[in-house]
């Protein structure tokens, strides 16, 4: 177990097809984003104190590690060869045992985040792990449909798997071929991050944390039998899609939107089953097009058409928002491409698959209108790296103090400063599983 500081990092995602239907065991297609969350883990001055410093959400909290009911918690965790075994659902007895440690948190945002932290910590670590500082910064907008919760869950699950001695050290270089991946350790992190996602929003499909763990692009399908593992098909030849991300900046909660679709399913079960079936066919059609060896104008046109249909179906499920419709109207009136909401909806982000022949003038006019409406746009590349770690010993000796400085990390002004100082492409030494 390392007592030297280290970072872990994992990406957000864009769901291209199949959000919400993914929760109902329909296939969905998503890819990793180049925006990421970073978690710094550093020994505390007092080895009994576990300290959280999550400045993005104004959370600063600490526990004495001796106050965690370790022995009782471990009674509810099955272990095989020292490795905690995953349960289908969060274990209610453990939630109950941790409730005293969470009782002084009045904000629900802080409560949920600390609950996720402690749930993973108390299962994956032991009383022997010295207290550390855990500090998170993210270049992802929070609650905007880009999987910020899953990126955090993967960072926490991977850091605790390192501290608990459940995974080998990440050792694959940034540009190494993916065949050298440590699949077993990645699967372990994927599974436990799903538990973290369950702490954030109850009934996640698992697509967000799968992409945040493994990176790349996937066709993902949760099985109807909750005990059966999800099916994840890597899409190696992911086509070069020209994508614009637009953030309405309207805050919303994934948990509430997923619950809203569930209520609709109960009330209009046959109608909503047909919508979900249509989403299934649509994701399958998109997949067939995306894996074609030749991806030309005909294929991009098909993806744009499917994008339009997918948005319509999400509107029918009640998860759009006037601001998302505004993005669509602006994009459509300037004919820049096909626009759909992405992620849980209700605000957050929309994606536009740009027309190949979109003119600079048309695009600039749209960007101006987006900005005038208070929306933020971002041109992005898809399919990047999954979870990785930056260990103390992999950073040049004379740079270690600066790189692992908690003060510098918590004070980065914006996304650009974080990417500049820590980006997996900018800083050498990042390793992947
Ligand atoms: N940078 C961050 N620092 C702390 N917690 C975060 C951060 N980013 C995300 N979270 C957690 O994830 C939650 C948002 O998740 P969610 O509603 O699923 O939206 P999304 O995953 O689309 O961004 C936040 O309420 C918070 O608990
Ligand atoms: C709505 C859903 O399909 C995606 C949610 O993504 P996000 O939290 O909005 O980034 C839920 C899920 O698949 O777990
Ligand atoms: Mg989320």
Image: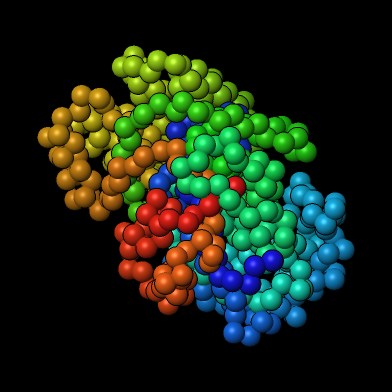
Name which quarter of the figure residue 46 lies in: bottom right
Residue drawn at x 67%, y 35% as measured from the top left: 230
Residue 269 in the image: state x and y as whole percent.
63, 30
Q: Is residue 302 above or below residue 388?
A: above
Q: Residue furthest left?
A: 361
Residue 343 in the image: state x and y as whole percent.
47, 42
Depth check, front residue: 133 or 369: 133
Relative horizontal placement of residue 160, taking residue 334 as reference (left or right): right
User: Would residue 275 be seen by someone viewing this image from the given angle?
Assistant: no
Relative horizontal placement of residue 366, taking residue 279 as reference (left or right): left
Residue drawn at x 31%, y 32% as measured from the top left: 242
Residue 195 in the image: state x and y as whole percent.
67, 52
Q: Residue furthest bottom?
A: 46
Relative horizontal placement of residue 23, taking residue 251 as reference (left or right): right
Q: Is residue 83 above or below residue 297?
A: below
Depth check, front residue: 395 or 343: 395
Tell me which colouring the rendered structure shows. rainbow
Depth check, front residue: 307 or 190: 190
Instruction: Work out which quarter of the rendered image holds the N terminus and state it.
Output: bottom right
Residue drawn at x 30%, y 46% as measured from the top left: 378
User: Would residue 42 be seen by someone viewing this image from the given angle?
Assistant: yes
Residue 206 in the image: state x and y as whole percent.
61, 42
Depth check, front residue: 433 or 37: 433
Name which quarter of the figure residue 408 lies in: bottom left
Residue drawn at x 43%, y 53% as measured from the top left: 424
């Amino acid at each position: 177990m390392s007592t030297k500081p280290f970072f872990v990092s994992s990406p957000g995602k864009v769901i291209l097809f199949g959000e919400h239907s993914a929760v109902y065991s329909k296939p969905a297609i998503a890819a990793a984003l180049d925006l990421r969350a970073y978690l710094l883990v550093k020994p505390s001055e007092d080895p009994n104190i576990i300290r959280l410093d999550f400045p993005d959400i104004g959370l600063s909290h600490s526990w004495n590690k001796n106050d965690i009911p370790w022995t009782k918690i471990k009674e509810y965790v099955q272990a095989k060869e020292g490795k905690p075994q995953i349960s289908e659902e969060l274990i209610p007895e453990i939630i109950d045992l941790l409730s005293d440690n969470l009782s002084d948190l009045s904000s629900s945002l802080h409560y949920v985040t600390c609950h996720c932290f402690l749930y993973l910590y108390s299962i994956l670590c032991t009383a022997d792990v010295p207290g550390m500082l855990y500090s998170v910064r993210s270049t992802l907008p929070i609650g905007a449909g880009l999987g910020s919760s899953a990126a955090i869950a993967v960072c926490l699950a991977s850091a605790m798997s390192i501290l608990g001695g459940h995974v080998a050290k990440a050792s694959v270089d940034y540009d190494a071929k993916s065949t050298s991946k440590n699949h077993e350790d990645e699967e372990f992190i994927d599974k436990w991050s799903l538990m973290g996602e369950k702490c954030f929003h109850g009934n996640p499909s698992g697509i967000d944390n799968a992409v945040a763990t493994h990176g790349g692009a996937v066709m993902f399908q949760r099985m109807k039998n909750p005990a059966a593992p999800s099916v994840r098909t890597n899409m190696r030849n992911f086509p070069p899609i020209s994508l614009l991300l637009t953030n309405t900046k309207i805050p919303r909660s994934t948990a509430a939107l997923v619950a809203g679709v569930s209520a609709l399913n109960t009330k209009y079960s046959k109608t909503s089953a047909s919508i979900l079936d249509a989403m299934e066919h649509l994701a399958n059609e998109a997949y067939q097009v995306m894996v074609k060896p030749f991806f030309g104008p005909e294929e991009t046109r098909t993806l744009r058409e499917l994008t339009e249909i997918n948005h319509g179906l999400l509107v029918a499920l009640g998860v759009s928002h006037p601001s998302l419709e505004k993005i669509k109207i602006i994009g459509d009136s300037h004919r820049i491409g096909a626009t759909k909401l992405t992620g849980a909806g209700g605000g957050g982000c929309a994606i536009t698959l740009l027309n190949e022949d979109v003119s600079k003038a048309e695009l600039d006019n749209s960007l101006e209108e987006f900005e005038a409406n208070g929306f933020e746009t971002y041109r992005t590349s898809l399919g990047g790296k999954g979870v990785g770690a930056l260990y103390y010993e992999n950073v040049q000796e004379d740079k270690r103090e600066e790189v692992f400085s908690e003060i510098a990390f918590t004070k980065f002004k914006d996304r650009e400063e974080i990417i500049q100082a820590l980006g997996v492409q900018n800083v050498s030494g990042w390793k992947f599983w």
